[in-house]
Image (spheres, rainbow, N blue to C red):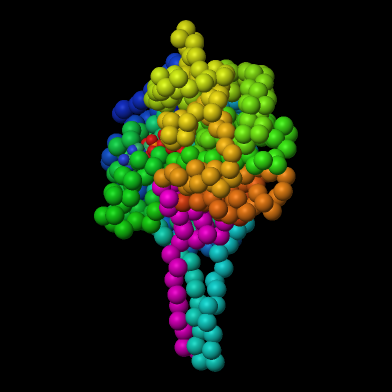
C-alpha cells in the first residue's frame, strides 16, 4: 500500500500551505505523537475564506451538471487513496481498521457520488393565466464546516458533498484531535477541484470563533458538543449566519416486553459500543423489560467478553481506545461516579494503569438508578447502563425526560406496536428493529438541545441554499 507519511499542509486557494506553528497529533492506541499538524494563523484562515469567496462566483455559476463532474472526479481521487486514508483514520482516531475505518472511508466516497447526482429543482408554486411564481434554491456563498473527532472523515464529507453540489464553496476546520485525515483529503481535493472551492485549515479551537463570527461566511455547518454549539449560536448571531448544528445526544434503546431479545444482543452491543461508544447516535441508555432483564445482561456480557480491546491496526481488535486524553479523563469521572455510588459493574470498570494509550474496557452497569450520572449524561464511551423497566408508558417518559433529543431505537416483535412507541419519542430519528442505518435521502438531525436543522434528505440539502421566489407577469 502507498503509505502517506506527511508532512501535512493547509489547503488554501488550491495550494498546500506551510505554517510557522505546528502542533502534535497523538495516536490514541499508543499515547505517543503520531505526526505534527499545521496550526493556521488568523491571517491564513482569512485567506482561506477570501479564496472561497472568490471561487464562489465561478463555482456557483457552473451549474449542477458540471459540479457533478468535479465531485465524481473527487470521489475517484479519494478512492485511489482509500487504503491510505483508512489507515490514517485508524492511526489518529483509534477505530478498528477493517470494521470501522474502511467502512467510514467507503461510505464517504459513495456519499459524494450519490449526492453529486441529486438536484434541487425549480418549483412552480403558483400559476394563473397571467402570472407564474417560481421557487429557486440559490447557494449561500462560503460555508464554514466545523467537525468533531469521532468520525472525522464521514462527518466532514457529509458537509462537503451537499454544500458543493448546491453551488457553495467551503472552508473546513477539523477537530485539533483528528486533523490529519481531513488535511489529507483536503490536499487530494486541490488536484481535482478548482482553487478555493474546498479549503482545509487546521489549528486550535480559537479558529472556530473566528469562523463563526466572520462576515464572509454565510453558513456554519457544525457537528460537535451541545456546549460548543451554544457558543456557535451566540457568535453567529452578529452576522445572522445560517446554521446547521448536529450536537450531543443521550439516545435510549427500548427493548419491549415482546422482543426476541436474544437475537438482538449483537445489534444492541454494537449500537452502544461501536466506535468505542463515541458516536452521537450511539445507544447511551439501554432499557430492557424486567421480565428478561437479568438474562439479557448475562447474554450482553457474554457477547462483550468475546471482543478484543486494542490497537485498531490489529485485525483481531474489535474495540479501539477512546480518541483523546481529554475524553479519557472525562470517562474516568463516569467510572468514579459509578463506583462512588455503589452501582453494580458486571463487566469491565477497571483501567489498566500500565497500558499506554487511552483504553477503556467495555463496561456494563447493571440497572443503575434513573437519576445517576451514567443514565443522565452523555458518556461517549464503551460504558453501557442496562436499566430494567416495568411499564412501557413509564419508560417512554424516562426516555423523553432529557434535554437531548437526537435519536433512539425501539425493539419488539410486534412492529406496529414498536412504531407506536417510536412515534412517542421526542427525537429527530428513531430506528425500529434496526440501528444506525443511514442514507443520502434520509434526514438526520436532532430535536431539543441535540440539533438545529437537519443533514441529508432534500431538507438537509435545502439548508445549503436560500429559497428565492421569482414572481413573473406573463
Ligand atoms: P466539540 O464541541 O468539543 O468540538 C467540535 C468542533 O468545534 C471542533 O472542531 C472544535 O475545535 C470546535 N470548537 C471548539 N470551540 C469552538 C468555538 N467556541 N466555536 C466554534 N467551534 C469551536 O465536540 P467534540 O468533543 O469534538 O465531539 C463530541 C461531541 O460531538 C459529542 O457531544 C457528540 O455527541 C457530538 N456529535 C454529534 C453528532 C451529530 O450528528 N449530532 C455527530 C458526532 C458528534
- The correct choice, above or below, for 385 with respect to 314 in the image is below
Q: Position of residue 363 (x, y in %)?
A: 54, 22
Span shown in magenta? 448-474
Q: Position of residue 153 (x, y in %)?
A: 52, 37
474 on left or right of 438: left
Q: Residue furthest bottom?
A: 129
Residue 307 is drawn in which quadrant?
top right
- Please tell me whether residue 389 belongs to the stretch shown in magenta: no
Residue 21 visible, this angle: yes
Q: Residue at 45%, 23% (x, y): give it.
A: 338
410 on left or right of 202: right
Q: Which of the pair 27/79 is nearer the observer? A: 27
351 on left or right of 43: right
Q: Residue at 54%, 43% (x, y): give it.
A: 395
What is the number of callouts on the image?
0
- The correct choice, above or below, for 256 with respect to 457 in the image is above
Q: Which of the pair 95/109 is nearer the observer? A: 95
Q: Residue at 51%, 43% (x, y): give it.
A: 399
Residue 83 is drawn in which quadrant?
top right
Q: Position of residue 124 (x, y in %)?
A: 55, 77
Q: Which of the pair 78/318 is nearer the observer? A: 318
Amino acid at each position: 500500500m502507498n503509505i502517506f507519511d506527511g508532512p501535512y499542509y493547509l489547503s488554501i486557494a488550491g495550494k498546500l500551505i506551510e505554517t510557522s506553528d505546528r502542533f502534535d497529533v497523538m495516536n490514541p492506541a499508543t499515547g505517543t505523537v503520531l505526526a505534527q499538524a499545521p496550526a493556521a494563523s488568523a491571517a491564513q484562515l482569512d485567506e482561506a475564506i477570501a479564496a472561497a469567496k472568490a471561487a464562489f462566483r465561478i463555482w456557483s455559476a457552473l451549474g449542477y451538471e458540471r459540479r457533478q463532474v468535479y465531485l465524481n472526479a473527487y470521489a475517484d481521487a479519494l478512492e485511489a487513496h482509500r487504503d491510505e486514508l483508512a489507515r490514517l483514520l485508524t492511526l489518529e482516531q483509534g477505530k478498528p481498521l477493517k470494521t470501522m475505518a474502511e467502512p467510514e472511508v467507503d461510505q464517504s466516497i459513495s456519499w459524494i457520488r450519490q449526492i453529486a447526482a441529486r438536484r434541487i429543482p425549480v418549483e412552480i408554486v403558483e400559476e394563473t393565466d397571467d402570472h407564474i411564481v417560481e421557487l429557486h434554491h440559490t447557494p449561500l456563498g462560503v460555508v464554514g464546516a466545523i467537525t468533531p473527532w469521532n468520525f472525522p472523515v464521514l462527518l466532514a464529507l457529509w458537509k462537503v458533498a451537499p454544500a458543493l453540489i448546491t453551488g457553495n464553496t467551503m472552508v473546513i476546520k477539523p477537530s485539533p484531535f483528528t486533523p490529519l485525515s481531513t488535511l489529507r483529503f483536503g490536499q487530494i481535493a486541490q488536484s481535482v477541484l478548482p482553487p478555493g472551492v474546498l479549503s482545509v485549515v487546521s489549528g486550535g479551537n480559537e479558529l472556530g470563533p473566528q469562523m463563526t463570527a466572520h462576515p464572509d461566511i454565510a453558513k456554519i455547518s457544525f457537528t460537535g458538543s451541545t456546549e460548543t454549539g451554544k457558543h456557535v449560536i451566540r457568535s453567529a448571531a452578529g452576522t445572522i449566519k445560517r446554521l446547521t448544528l448536529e450536537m450531543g445526544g443521550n439516545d435510549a434503546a427500548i427493548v419491549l416486553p415482546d422482543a426476541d431479545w436474544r437475537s438482538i444482543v449483537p445489534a444492541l452491543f454494537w449500537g452502544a459500543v461501536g466506535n468505542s461508544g463515541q458516536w452521537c447516535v450511539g445507544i447511551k441508555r439501554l432499557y430492557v423489560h424486567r421480565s428478561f432483564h437479568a438474562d439479557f445482561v448475562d447474554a450482553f456480557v457474554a457477547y462483550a467478553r468475546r471482543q478484543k480491546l486494542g490497537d485498531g491496526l490489529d485485525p483481531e481488535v474489535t474495540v479501539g481506545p477512546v480518541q483523546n486524553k481529554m475524553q479519557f479523563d472525562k470517562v474516568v469521572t463516569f467510572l468514579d461516579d459509578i463506583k462512588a455510588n455503589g452501582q453494580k459493574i458486571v463487566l469491565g470498570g477497571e483501567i489498566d494503569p500500565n497500558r499506554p494509550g487511552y483504553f477503556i474496557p467495555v463496561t456494563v452497569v447493571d440497572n443503575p438508578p434513573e437519576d445517576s450520572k451514567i443514565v443522565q449524561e452523555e458518556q461517549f464511551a464503551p460504558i453501557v447502563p442496562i436499566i430494567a423497566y416495568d411499564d412501557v408508558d413509564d419508560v417512554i417518559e424516562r426516555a423523553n425526560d432529557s434535554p437531548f433529543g437526537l435519536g433512539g431505537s425501539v425493539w419488539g416483535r410486534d412492529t406496529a406496536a414498536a412504531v407506536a412507541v417510536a412515534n412517542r419519542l421526542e427525537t429527530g430519528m428513531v430506528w425500529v428493529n434496526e440501528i444506525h442505518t443511514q442514507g443520502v435521502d434520509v434526514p438526520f438531525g436532532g430535536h431539543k438541545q441535540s440539533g438545529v436543522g437537519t443533514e441529508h434528505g432534500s431538507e438537509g440539502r435545502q439548508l445549503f441554499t436560500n429559497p428565492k421566489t421569482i414572481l413573473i407577469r406573463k
